[in-house]
Image (spheres, grey):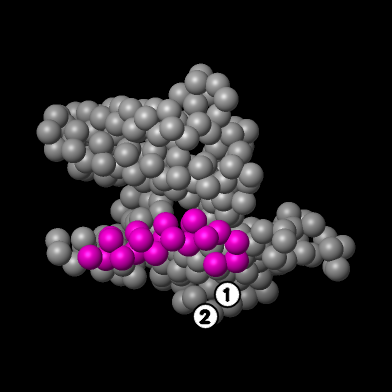
């Protein structure tokens, strides 16, 4: 527990500091975290990160991750999405060229994993660089952290009905409801002092979406770990597991709120 607290305080302070600083230091942090997260996913699948398969996954992920002001593909007359689609075709062709040493299953995993990690961290950067980005990012972080804390304590105190035992045996419906309730309360207090949206109805809907999709993101990563029979995604954060263990909710939330027009 002591190690967990020390790691949490140091890592949390560094993370918040770089969010406040923004600009290149923050972007470099996101690139580093996304690269480690992708490495963790590849290890779950037992794909060597420095192999052709692993490097393909990293390239895919970086294509989706890096913001426009850091990398541009106009010199080859292709948009980022078009280049991504081209690389998908190349990966599928490799399943034939390698005579199935690089399987269709592995190609699908590389594509899905790179989109999961790359888009999640990309939209976290995107949100930070908005005009009200700092207020938005802290609002999202507070909602995610409040949901996690509320779910933990409500689950321990009142949890009786399992939420999804096949995926995460310890999570309960009571815990989920408690997490959402605490997120709404703390998020509501936050917006009293730092309003993010002009309308209270939009603010309430945003808080609800972040809390619920954050819990779904946590279950998604739990499903990954259960499928690949691993306890933690990695050991980069002593006492806390890997980067995916800490950012699973966040990187699932970010593309969702972008698609719903909140960003």
**Image x and y of residue 50, in percent:** 52, 80
Task: Tell me the quarter of the image containing the N terminus.
Answer: bottom left
User: In percent of the image, x 62 and y 51: which residue is there?
Assistant: 129
Vertically, is 243 above or below 198? Answer: below
Q: Hey, which residue is sitting farthest bottom in the picture?
A: 50
Write down the region rendered in magenta: 6-25
134 to the left or right of 143: right
183 to the left or right of 22: left
**Image x and y of residue 135, in percent:** 51, 42
**Image x and y of residue 208, in percent:** 43, 28
User: In percent of the image, x 54 and y 39: which residue is there?
Assistant: 256
Picture quadrant of residue 191 = top left
Residue 198 covered by magenta stretch: no
User: In percent of the image, x 63 and y 46: which residue is there?
Assistant: 130
Is residue 245 in view from this perspective? yes
Vertically, is 73 above or below 245? Answer: below
Task: Tell me the quarter of the image containing the C terminus.
Answer: top right
Residue 24 covered by magenta stretch: yes
Dot 2, crowdedness within 10 Å: few (<14), some or many (≥20)?
Answer: few
Q: Which residue is mark 1?
A: 55
Dot 1, crowdedness within 10 Å: few (<14), some or many (≥20)?
Answer: some
> Magenta-highlighted stretch: main secondary structure?
helix
Q: Label 1's element?
A: helix
Front residue of 119/13: it is 13
Q: Label 2's element?
A: loop
66 to the left or right of 219: right
Q: Which residue is mark 2?
A: 50
Q: Hey, which residue is sitting farthest top in the picture?
A: 201
Q: Do the numbered discs 1 and 2 sit on residues whose CB atoms are within 8 Å?
A: yes
User: In percent of the image, x 14 and y 29: which residue is there?
Assistant: 158
């Amino acid at each position: 527990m002591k190690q967990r607290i020390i790691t949490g305080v140091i890592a949390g302070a560094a993370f918040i500091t770089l969010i406040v600083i923004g600009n290149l230091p923050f972007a470099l942090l996101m690139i580093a975290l996304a690269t480690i997260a992708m490495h963790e996913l590849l290890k779950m699948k037992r794909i060597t990160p420095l192999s052709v398969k692993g490097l393909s996954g990293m390239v895919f992920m970086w294509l989706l991750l890096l913001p426009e002001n850091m990398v541009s593909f106009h010199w080859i007359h292709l948009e980022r999405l078009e280049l991504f689609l081209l690389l998908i075709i190349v990966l599928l062709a490799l399943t034939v060229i390698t005579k199935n040493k690089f399987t269709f299953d592995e190609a699908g995993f590389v594509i899905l994993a790179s989109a999961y990690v790359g888009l999640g961290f990309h939209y976290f950067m995107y949100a930070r660089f908005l005009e009200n980005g700092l207020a938005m990012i802290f609002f999202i972080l507070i909602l995610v952290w409040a949901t996690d804390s509320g779910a933990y304590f409500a689950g321990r105190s009142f949890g009786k009905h399992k939420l999804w035992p096949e995926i995460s045996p310890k999570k309960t419906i009571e815990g989920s409801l408690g997490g959402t309730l605490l997120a709404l309360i703390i998020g509501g207090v936050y917006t009293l002092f730092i309003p993010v949206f002009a309308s209270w109805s939009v603010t309430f809907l945003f808080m609800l979406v972040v809390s619920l999709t954050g819990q779904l993101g946590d279950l998604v990563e739990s499903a990954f770990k259960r499928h690949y029979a691993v306890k933690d995604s990695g050991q980069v954060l002593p006492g806390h597991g890997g980067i995916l263990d800490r950012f699973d909710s966040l990187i699932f939330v970010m593309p969702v709120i972008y698609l719903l027009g909140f960003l």
